[in-house]
Image (tube, helix red, strand yellow):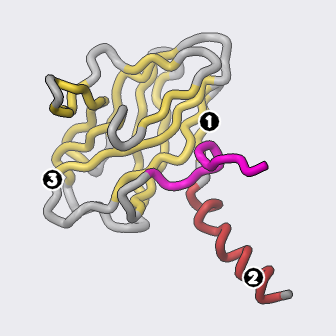
Amino acid sequence: MKKLLLAALVATLPLAAAAHETRAGALTVHHAWSRLLPPSAPNGAAYFELANRGQDADRLLGAATPRAGKAELHTHVNDNGVMRMREVEGGVAVPAGQTVRFAPGGLHVMLMGLNAPLAKGERFPLTLRFEKAGEVKVEVVVEDGMAAPATAHSMPAHH
């Protein structure tokens, strides 16, 4: 029984570690993460879920980090059958009562000109700049793998 309990505890540790969040008023930035990349990769990306539990909309205007020369808000668009990354002009709306997901293949913070390779387990600061909430500092965790990690918000419910 002790071994089973210990195994269950160990199995849940990655989810607990992955479930970090930052609150700023009505906004919550949940689980900011980046992918482990080859050491030669000059650019990277940061992903997270951005929830607005307030009554008023806000807008994410930009981002900055000391880990890269430049950080921009990007999305993927279909350009005549070819998926291309494009900077988001004017920022990303965060409607009241809604969650906006920054994930691979969609919205993301593009980290251009990394000053060192992203290492698994590394944590680095990312400052998000909002129209109303102002600057919100979050911690990005570099994780292995190609897909978004399971979080409490993205795990399916089993009935």
Residue drawn 41% across the image and 48% down it? 125
- Count of marks, rendered view: 3
Q: Marks 2 and 3, how far apart in space?
A: 41 Å
Q: Nearer the viewer, mark 3 or mark 1?
A: 3
Query: Would you say the magenta stretch is mainly helix, strand or loop?
Result: loop
Report x, y in % for residue 99.
56, 27
Q: Nearer the viewer, mark 2 or mark 3?
A: 2
Residue sitting nearer the eye, 119 or 80: 80
Q: Inspect the image, locate mark 2, and give the three-letter code of the amino acid beneath it.
A: Leu
Residue drawn 45% across the image and 17% down it? 93
Task: Answer left or right for 64 relative to 38.
Answer: right
Count neighbours of disc 1 (C-alpha within 10 A) and say few if under 14, some if 14 to 19, many if 20 or more.
some
Count neighbours of disc 2 (C-alpha within 10 A) and say few if under 14, some if 14 to 19, many if 20 or more.
few
As helix, strand or loop, the secondary structure at mark 1 comes to strand
Q: Inspect the image, locate mark 1, and give the three-letter code of the amino acid beneath it.
A: Arg
As helix, strand or loop, the secondary structure at mark 2 comes to helix
Instruction: Name the N-terminal-most of marks 2 and 3.
Output: 2
As helix, strand or loop, the secondary structure at mark 3 comes to loop
Numbered range of the magenta stretch: 148-159
Q: Marks 2 and 1, how far apart in space?
A: 32 Å
Residue sitting nearer the eye, 71 or 150: 150
Label 1 sits on residue = 23
Which numbered disc covers residue 6? Answer: 2
Report x, y in % for residue 122.
40, 64
Label 3 sits on residue = 42
Q: Is residue 94 above or below residue 123?
A: above
Q: Nearer the viewer, mark 2 or mark 1?
A: 2
Residue sitting nearer the eye, 114 or 103: 103
Residue drawn 54% across the image and 15% down it? 95
